[in-house]
């Protein structure tokens, strides 16, 4: 596809807002390699009209556990927390072949790396595409996924032996 065709067919996402949570261990205003990669993704989203903002988790007092008291450490899948995850929703820099210079280190090649840039662009577009689909359709329908109704006896077309 020619560059002008790519621009002409570009989706516009002015109705979207993206929040980036940078999980670097470096406090502001230290330069963080994670933010260098996030900046690439933000540029893709902003070029499509999306508004973006960024917070560094380390700069805030955040509870790190899980319910009920937010002190127990445990792993829970993002999809169990209610996130919808599009395909290829990750990007990162591990150097040309593993450990080595960090993304923004002089001479690292990180910002120029085609593999990293490609994956960052694809991730950013897939995040916007799925967010737009969900937002514009009113989100995921509630029918069939409400625990309170299940607990009250509704089985959403699943056989309920108690109501035969």
Image (spheres, rainbow, N blue to C red):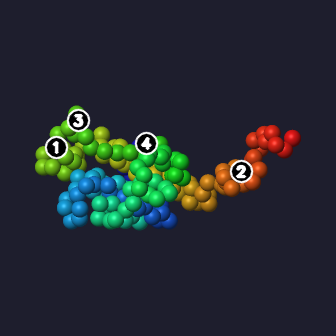
Q: Secondary structure at mark 2?
A: helix
Q: Can residue 99 be spotted in the picture?
A: yes
Q: Nearer the viewer, mark 2 or mark 1?
A: 2
- Tag 3 residue: 98
Q: Residue at x 52, y 52 (%)?
A: 81
According to the picture, the residue beneath numbered tag 1 turns out to be 101
Answer yes or no: is residue 38 visible. Answer: no
Residue at the limit of the structure toward the top, as seen here: 97
The answer to whether mark 2 and mark 4 are in CB contact below 8 A is no
Q: CA distance from mark 2 to mark 3?
A: 48 Å
Q: Is residue 112 left or right of residue 134?
A: left
Cβ atoms at labels 2 and 1 below 8 Å apart: no
Side (left or right) of 108 relative to 58: left
Label 2 or label 4, whichever lies nearer to me, is: 2
User: What is the secondary structure assignment of the residue under circle 1?
Assistant: loop
Query: Is disc 2 surrounded by few (<14), some (14 to 19) or many (20+) residues within 10 Å?
Result: few
Label 4 neighbour load within 10 Å: few <14, some 14-19, many 20+: some
Query: For the residues carrying marks 2 and 3, which lies nearer the camera in this image?
Result: 2
Q: Position of residue 96 (x, y in %)?
A: 22, 36
| Cα separation between marks 1 and 3 | 9 Å
Residue receiving disc 4: 88
Pick whichever of labels 2 and 4 is earlier in the sequence.
4
Say whether residue 36 is left or right of residue 132.
Answer: left
x and y, in percent, of residue 113 in the image: 24, 43
Place of residue 153 in the rendered image (x, y in percent of width and height, measured from the top left):
77, 50
Q: Which residue is mark 2?
A: 150
Q: Earlier in the sequence, mark 4 or mark 3?
A: 4
């Amino acid at each position: 596809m020619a560059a002008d065709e790519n621009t002409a067919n570009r989706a516009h996402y002015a109705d979207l807002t993206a929040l980036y949570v940078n999980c670097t261990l470096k406090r502001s205003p230290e330069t963080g390699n994670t933010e260098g990669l996030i900046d690439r993704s933000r540029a893709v989203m902003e070029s499509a009209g999306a508004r973006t903002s960024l917070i560094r988790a380390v700069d805030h007092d955040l509870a790190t556990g899980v319910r009920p008291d937010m002190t127990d450490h445990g792993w829970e899948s993002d999809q169990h927390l209610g996130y919808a995850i599009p395909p290829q929703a990750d990007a990162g820099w591990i150097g040309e072949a593993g450990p080595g210079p960090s993304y923004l280190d002089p001479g690292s090649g990180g910002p120029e790396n085609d593999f990293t840039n490609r994956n960052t662009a694809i991730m950013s577009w897939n995040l916007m595409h799925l967010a737009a689909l969900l937002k514009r359709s009113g989100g995921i329908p509630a029918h069939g996924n409400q625990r309170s109704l299940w607990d009250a006896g509704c089985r959403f077309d699943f056989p309920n032996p108690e109501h035969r």
